[in-house]
Image (spheres, helix red, strand yellow):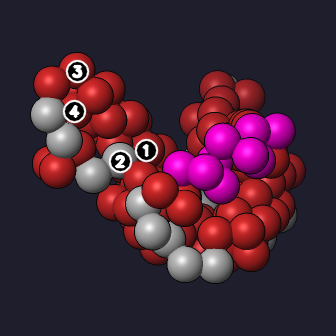
Amino acid sequence: MLYISLFPQLLIGFYFLFFGLWNGYHWKPTIEAMVSKKIPFASPLLAFGILLESIAGTAIILGIGIKIAAAVLIPFDLVAVCLFHNFWCMQGEIRRLNMIIFISNTTATLGALILLLVGSI
């Protein structure tokens, strides 16, 4: 039973670690997207986000400082998802795609909120 209860924690940690690494690997198009959305200090903010998601995701996976990791991920992810996937300002197919991504990201943030409230699942 213990291993089953660790599975959600591992998935939540993996989600954030994966997208931290994903954004690092896709640095150039991510910077271009940030600049097109007129986000100031795009490079340092992206570097900060990559480090934050990667370190906090790893901490959650390893069960180290889970509540702290979740506490720093929640506001970061909420701000990032509203800046990048503001589907309410879009039309057509791109709106639907960004709405799906928005819901996915906010669901992961909800998982982090649960970790913040209860610690290790």
Residue 64 located within the stretch drawn in magenta: no
- The residue under the point 47% across, 56% down is 36
- Mark 1 against mark 4, which lies toward the viewer? 4
| Residue at mark 2 | 85
Mark 3 crowd level (few <14, some 14–19, many ≥20, 10 Å Cα) = few
Which numbered tag is attached to residue 95?
A: 4
Q: Earlier in the sequence, mark 1 or mark 4?
A: 4
Residue 26 located within the stretch drawn in magenta: yes
User: From which residue to which does the magenta span run?
Assistant: 25-33
- The residue under the point 64% across, 69% down is 42
Label 1, label 4: how many angstroms apart (C-alpha)? 15 Å
- Residue 73 located left or right of residue 66: left
Three-letter residue code for mark 4? Arg
Which numbered tag is attached to residue 13?
A: none
* Tags 1 and 4 touching, CB below 8 Å: no
Q: Earlier in the sequence, mark 1 or mark 2?
A: 2
| Residue at mark 1 | 105
Circle 3 sits in a helix, a strand or a loop, which is it? helix
87 or 119, which is in the foreground?
87
Circle 1 sits in a helix, a strand or a loop, which is it? helix
> Does residue 118 show up?
no
